[in-house]
Image: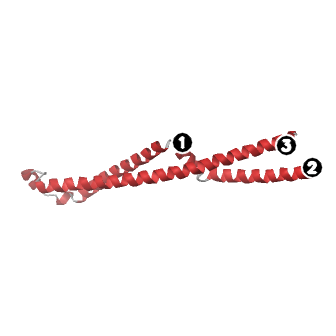
Amino acid sequence: MISMLKGIRVLLSEERIKKMIRLSDYEAGMGEMDLRRTRYRRRDYVRLQVLRAVAGMVAASILILGMVMLYFIDRIPWKTYVSEGFFTWDRTLWIAGGFVVWFILLGILCSLTGRRSRREYDEAAARVNEYDVTLDELLRLYEDERKEESA
């Protein structure tokens, strides 16, 4: 009977050690990012990611537009702009077309970012749930071991 109890205790200790190793590996690796993601509700996390993507696209567009303007600054016929005005029909159509293309790209970016963020959040939530279940199992093993020691 005593040898049987010792065998159970060794089995519980091995199982406990395996669970502890699995938990520590998770916490040291992806767990930190997953726990940070799941602090938010899913909807808030997705909105934050979309907002970051929009801010990045606006900043990148402003930088690209500024670089293009600086590149072509010496080729701009300033005298014709002064006499004719900048907003001729052709230029207005080009500017409007550029804005339409930009907004279409922005919509595509928002859609893709939203889908990716939802998938990332769901995967992180599943891993955190598995982490919680493993942690509960480990606590139960500790409690079982304490009960056996006190008995």
Quick one: quadrant of the C terminus? top right
N-terminal of the pair, mark 2 or mark 3, is: 2
Q: Position of residue 14 (x, y in %)?
A: 78, 54
Q: Nearer the viewer, residue 86 or 139?
A: 139
CA gap between label 1 and label 3 equals: 37 Å
Q: Position of residue 3 (x, y in %)?
A: 92, 52
Residue of label 2: 2
CA gap between label 1 and label 2 equals: 47 Å
Residue of label 1: 39
Q: Position of residue 96 (x, y in %)?
A: 20, 53
Residue of label 3: 148
Report the residue that reaches farthest toward the front: 1
Q: Residue at x 76, y 46 (%)?
A: 141
Lateral position of residue 122 relative to residue 105, left or right = right
N-terminal of the pair, mark 1 or mark 3, is: 1
| Mark 3 surroundings: few (<14), some (14-19) or many (≥20) residues within 10 A | few
Q: Secondary structure at mark 1?
A: loop
Q: Position of residue 60 (x, y in %)?
A: 34, 53
Q: Give the colour scheme of this rendering.
A: secondary structure
CA gap between label 2 and label 3 equals: 12 Å
Is disc 2 in contact with disc 3, using a CB cutoff of under 8 Å? no
Identified by mark 2, the residue type is Ile
Lateral position of residue 146 relative to residue 123, left or right = right
Identified by mark 3, the residue type is Glu
Question: Which quadrant would residue 100 be assigned to in this image?
Answer: bottom left
Identified by mark 1, the residue type is Arg
